[in-house]
Image (cartoon, coloured by chain):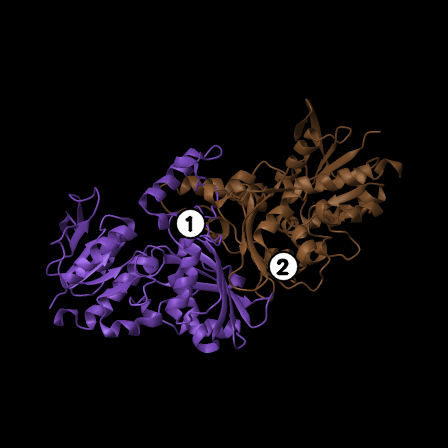
Chain colours: A brown, B purple
Amino acid sequence: MSLRIGLLGATGLVGRTMLALLEARDLAIEPPRLLASGRDPGARLPFRGRSLPVAAVGPDAFAGLDLALFATANAVSARWADVARGAGARVVDNSSAFRYDAAVPLVVPEVNGELLDARPTLVANPNCSTIAIVVALAPLHRAWRLERLAVATYQSVSGGGAAALAALERGVRDGLEGPPPPREGGLPPFAFNVVPQIDRFEPNGYTREEMKIAWESRKILGLPELPVSATAVRVPVRIGHAAAVSARFASPPDPAAARALWSAFPGITVVDDPARGRYPTPLEAAGSDAVLVGRARRDLSQPDALEFFVASDNLRKGAATNAVQIAERLGRAGVGAR
Amino acid sequence: MSLRIGLLGATGLVGRTMLALLEARDLAIEPPRLLASGRDPGARLPFRGRSLPVAAVGPDAFAGLDLALFATANAVSARWADVARGAGARVVDNSSAFRYDAAVPLVVPEVNGELLDARPTLVANPNCSTIAIVVALAPLHRAWRLERLAVATYQSVSGGGAAALAALERGVRDGLEGPPPPREGGLPPFAFNVVPQIDRFEPNGYTREEMKIAWESRKILGLPELPVSATAVRVPVRIGHAAAVSARFASPPDPAAARALWSAFPGITVVDDPARGRYPTPLEAAGSDAVLVGRARRDLSQPDALEFFVASDNLRKGAATNAVQIAERLGRAGVGAR
């Protein structure tokens, strides 16, 4: 039978990407039920030649659904997750509201997808940068055992949502002939600039985005004590997050062996041919479901460590693709058989 | 008496910035002798209300000069440095042609300016990213002794010269409505992208730009065995290089103490007030001679380490300002008294 899928937050950047993926992939589904909070109900979105209405989320919005994909802010996810579960839908939530709840699996299917076999009723979808980093680390960790992780990110503005992306576009146009103006509230421009703040600051001096990379890498890889540090930086790119990664292992890693491990791992495309100027870039990653990995080299500053560079489409594998992959595996595990 | 200064490479981005600094600062100089290789001789550049001619460099171009500032590619510097020295001029060279020669001091005046007291006839000006990183590290190293350095850079396109900057501007305009086209030769666009290659690749998988950060940090700080790793990335910013830095020390560092050390050190402006959204950005650094430092925090992934973020104007402190500061100190040390 066809799955009945609901999509809360359907009109956002990630929600629209989820809808496009549901349209293109081969999961047998009925036309999704599109839901929105806030001001977007009343919109219509195309799906397989039809125009689907976007309904306001409400207490009865999830009745009859097998799966509900949430592409919403934390408060909205927290408000509606139990309502959807109460109506019998399994929830895949892209917000960070439930990611650090020990009872909620945080899943990247290629890495810890076996957690879905228990048919959880709520699954958290990880942070956009973390997903790509963890996919690239997983085969290396299995071979050499990860002991330390340090990351600096180059994150696109679409990660901040449609309003942030519009601010970038305005800033670029306003900055064609000179410095772009500040964003609303006096914030530093995205255009022609890099901004070393994503999300709010924690008391330890790291931003919450940086701590998400630490907390979520540990949880997904099953390494609760893993030492992790990150610097998360917004760059004037539309779509595609990149990261410079340094990973130290218990056994000595090797760049050629790393490339072989990556090539054999699902979801990874190795782009690593410096002699031909080939390495991952966000523009190349945009529109792809793969995590691009390259620039593999021995870390010169510490023994038994490897440095590499990843790029992925933050709206796809960093968000919508990963959520839809979770939904597909939950679906195959027999959602309709409840 | 007034110093007689020559400027080879006067028409490039760094050369023009040098000329602007010579105009604005209080060093007593005669109108500089402007020199160029390649196709630029015949141009004229303004200086203190006059229009100065740009002459072709040649065997007699340096006669009578006290100082020659070189803002040129390696091959040009290598060709003319000894000619200038033979004519009696002290050379401050911004290329990397002489930086790794043990007999040539590599100088950041705030850090190892005492090397200029010996009145060397050739001084190398360091790499644009390295200067800012080393200025920020110097007071911390004096307090706690540096033992490991890891860096990821966010480097502006002006670091690649005027042609690269023009390619960025074209790419941004061509990319206003969609993905920007590749650069000449099929290279990945600068616009709306990040490119993890600056300079050519070395056999160890690092780019030469990354190795410059390692080699030059060691030489300037006097730590020939310092473990250093770097990832150098071009971002679509016009002017201003930034870097995420992780530095491990022999003694435990402290973020508040680091801010105090920075505040007391010449050439640094501390921009580190997360609660108010204040941290270094390249747009804020552009046009300033200071190295901006902020985001100081204990490194969560290794003991006795500090993470921070720096930004500086790569054409000014990263190149022209540092060279002119060297020239000023050489001048004060009695260049005219030879």
Q: Is residue A114 above or below residue B147?
A: above
- Specify the subunit that label 2 lies on: A
Label 2 residue SS: helix
- Give residue A110's position: percent from left, percent from top: 71, 45
Amino acid type for the residue under numbered disc 1: Ile
Amino acid type for the residue under numbered disc 2: Met
Q: Residue furthest top?
A: A49
- Give residue A174's position: percent from left, percent from top: 41, 41
Q: Residues within 10 Å of mark 2 (few under 14, many from 20)?
A: many
- Give residue B294's position: percent from left, percent from top: 47, 64
Query: Splitting the image into 4 quarters, where does residue A157 fall?
Result: top right
Question: In front: A153, or B77?
Answer: B77
Q: How many angstroms separate mark 2 from mark 1 (CA)?
A: 29 Å
- Specify the subunit that label 1 lies on: B
Q: Residue at x 22, y 51 (%)?
A: B10
- Specify the quadrant that holds the C terminus of chain B: bottom left
Judging by the rendered image, the residue that carries numbered circle 2 is: A211
Judging by the rendered image, the residue that carries numbered circle 1 is: B198
Q: Is residue A15 above or below residue B315?
A: above
**Is residue A245 visible from the viewing direction of this image?**
no
Question: In front: A196, or B212?
Answer: B212
